Image (spheres, rainbow, N blue to C red):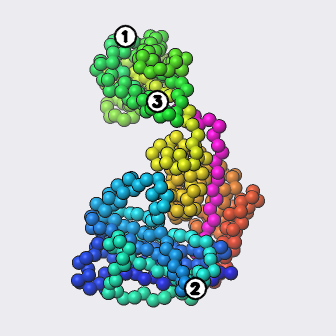
Amino acid sequence: MNRSIQFIVCVLAILCQNINPAVAQTRSYDGVISVVPVQLEQRGKSVYINIDFVLEDVKVKSAHGVDFIPQLVAPAHTYNLPKVSIKGHNEYLAYERWLSLMSAKEKDSYEKPYVVEKGSKKRNDTIRYRYILPYESWMDDARVDVQRDECGCGEIQLMDVEPLGDIELERILVPYVVTPFFAYLQPKAEEVKSRDIQAECFLDFEVNKINIRPEYMNNPKELAKIRAMIDELKSDPSIKVNKLDIVGYASPEGSLANNKRLSEGRAMALRDYLASRYDFSRNQYYIIFGGENWDGLVKALDTIDFEYKDEALNIINDIPVEKGREAKLMQLRGGVPYRYMLKYIFPSLRVAICKVNYEIKNFNLDEAKEIIKTRPQQLSLQEMYLVAQTYAKGSKEFNEVFDVAVRMFPDDPTANINAAAIELQRGDLQQAARYLDKADAQASATLNNRGVLNLLQGDLDQAEINFKKAQSLGSAEAGANLKEVSKKRKDNAIFGNR
């Protein structure tokens, strides 16, 4: 049975018009920060605490900060909730430096804030505080206090402020706010964590020559790109390089046979250059003839503006190579467009690509928690998922893991299911819909989260359809969400909504 919990907001120095002038001079910020209670309610085994911190023309002084500290307070208990911290420019930089110097042991014992945000520029927005606690019997008579600390030392500054009265949520007739249940899907383990990375190299060769001169024209810079990529892989003990594909492309002028000879020869020259500097075996190199680089020519033409460009593109798109495409280009407008391309575009089409395929070792949980901060591309989706499970569901850290996962695996259906759940929790329904469109449409987690999207959009009928489909596939979250649909239907009947 739901229990009513009083929501008392003790707001210290928040309403500007009630602050005496002597105190205002010591304020760490300009503007008004209002605390708006949204929800304090026990449902089943959980207590939901929702607060909005509304910022109006707020700018925090550079070397200062302000903390808002919610507490769940009962006659014999006080439970500290994670604080909201807004810092000025220098104070925020100092905080970041302090975090970076913390040891692993210190990080484990550190009481993480709910959020730490910059306030160095004037802000007019809302920080939404959404927190869930396991219900305990002492909370029946609890209230929520919100205190303000501007000195950072835990001492509350008392200001001359009009007090806010008690708020009994059950005495206020307000529309029922649904509490959706989001579904997350554990990714399958990768048997082999295989990855590819590549670097393009625009090498300069002497006319009709295939040997690389490392100091010739722009070659030092181009070769350095490939070396930097390989050096980074070789310096990482968790990586094993499997093979290196050397792909050579030719510009379209001249015969196909000669272009094939030049591009293959130049690709082999790049292989020989790398073989002289690294200890990869010869059979790890693969030479590939990429062909005449017509695709590269089209992309280059799309980025520039010159006369007759559209006519040149029409010839490239409409006339096959074997039907005389190059000859038609040479004849176009007396050869003017062709000579332009020959001089300014064709050299950039003679590109070599070094693509490296490599494997990454599996990481234990402690390793993965550190690697996700600096080298997330080395983790599998399953490793990221297990990292997320070490944080409270819905916490800032929990959400950030799934943000990273979908950024690293943008087309993976599972990554998109979980990212959709995060965006639904944040209230970004448009982004959630985009993620759901890339998820497995028939998966129970997708159906549940799409039902949540419908629920939050107010489409109860479609929400119910999706929840029932998800429930039939074994989704426990969908069963809980069907109860939310039922509650909202009753609520709509009270308020006259359909």
- In the rendered structure, which segment of residues is drawn in magenta? 177-196
Identify the mark at residue 234; answer none if there is no mark.
3
At a point 73% along the width and 61% down the height, the residue shown is 471
Classify 10 Å Cα crowding around label 1: few (below 14), some (14-19), many (20 and above). Answer: few
Q: Residue furthest right?
A: 472
Residue at disc 2, secondary structure: helix
- In the depicted view, which residue is nearer to us: 141 or 367? 367
* Mark 3 burial class by Cα count in 10 Å: few <14, some 14-19, many 20+: some
* Residue at disc 1, secondary structure: loop
In the rendered view, tell whether residue 94 sits above or below residue 298.
below
- Residue type at tag 1: Asn
- Give the spatial CA distance, label 3 vs label 1: 34 Å
Q: Which residue does the numbered mark 1 point to in the structure image? A: 208
Quickly name the residue at label 2: 141
Tag 1–tag 2 contact (CB < 8 Å): no
Label 3 element class: helix
The kind of residue tagged 2 is Asp
Tell me the quarter of the image containing the N terminus: bottom right
| Closer to us: 337 or 35 | 35
Of mark 3 and mark 2, the one earlier in the sequence is 2
3 and 2 marks in contact (CB < 8 Å): no
Q: x, y (%) of residue 49?
A: 53, 74
Spot occupied by residue 293 in the image (x, y as percentages of width and height): 45, 23
CA gap, disc 1 to disc 2?
87 Å
